[in-house]
Amino acid sequence: MAELEERGIQPGVVVLQGGKELPKYDTDGELVFRQESYFQWAFGVAEPGCFGVISLANGDATLLVPRLPADYACWHGEVRTPEWFSARYGLAVQFVDQMATVLKDFAPGWLHVLDGTNSDSGAAVAPTQLPPLAPGLEFLFDDGAFELPHAVMTRLRAVKTEEELAVMRYAAAVTSRAHVTLMQRCKAGMFEYTLEAEFMHRIALAGCRHAAYTPIAASGRNAATLHYGHAGCAQ
């Protein structure tokens, strides 16, 4: 809020879209879900399919969660209520299909969504895809009133809290120990995929479900390739 105000950004609401569960191409299998980074930074919510709304007038925030059918429980477990989400994350909670009502309560003049480009990779940060607004709510938004706080949020994410630094230090320590374990156990005749499995095993035992990168368990001349380790490499 302070950063946007300092830059002269018009007051209103920021709407952020969380990550979605993605199918594996045309199958009914799903890729392992990881939350969208900007949404994770702002709301810390682990579940997919969510939106978040932040008022620039007073800092009030509302989490919007998907309304799931009852048969969801057969496949994925308990259908969690808005009350459950509110208790877990300390936020007001509504369903995604109630976004129009939430925005009307906030009465924004400007709607700010995330849109920009990663300056390192050149990849576009997809703009927030708002659900259709209920008829009659168009008056809430000024014409063309879409500011882009991507650069602001990117800069703020580079400044870490003590809690964030503690998590980063833990992840770095776990990774370092896994590399040391690989070096200690590596011996002639082992396969690269065995070493990769050893690395993933060590970080999983430390409570880390994901690795930040594919481990480079390269032998022979493969070790001369900086980013060796894609799916076609394991031997």
Image (cartoon, rainbow, N blue to C red):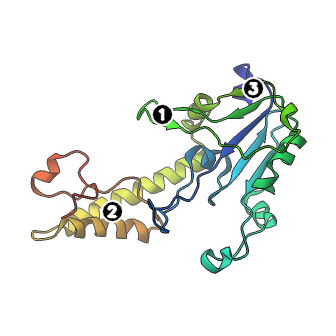
Which residue sits at x=14%, y=58%?
Answer: 219
Q: Do the residues labelled 2 and 1 touch (CB within 8 Å)?
A: no
User: What residue lies at 56% left-to-right and 34% top-to-bottom?
Assistant: 154
Residue 178: mark = 2
Q: Position of residue 202 (x, y in %)?
A: 36, 68
Instruction: Decide which of tag 2 and tag 3 comes sooner along the chain.
Output: 3
Q: How far apart in space, not on screen, are marks 1 and 3 (Cα)?
A: 23 Å
* Placement of the C terminus among the 4 image quadrants: bottom left
Residue 13 location in percent, x, y?
78, 35
User: Which mark's residue is nearer the viewer, 2 or 3?
Assistant: 3
Q: Check whether the beta carbons of the residues at disc 1 and disc 3 lie within 8 A of each other.
A: no
Residue where numbered disc 3 is placed: 145
Determine whether, in the image, residue 171 is placed left or right of residue 51: left
| Residue 158 seen anywhere in this rendered image of the structure | yes
Say which amino acid is labelled 1: Asn
- 123 and 205: which is toward the camera: 123
Residue at point 62%, 29% (across, down):
152
User: Of helix, strand and loop, which one carries label 2?
Assistant: helix
Image quarter (top left, top right, bottom left or bottom right) of the N terminus: top right
Q: In the image, 36: left or right of 142?
A: left
Q: How far apart are marks 2 and 1 (CA)?
A: 30 Å
Q: Is residue 183 left or right of residue 53?
A: left
Question: Residue 206 placed where, x, y %?
Answer: 44, 68
Mark 1 residue element: loop
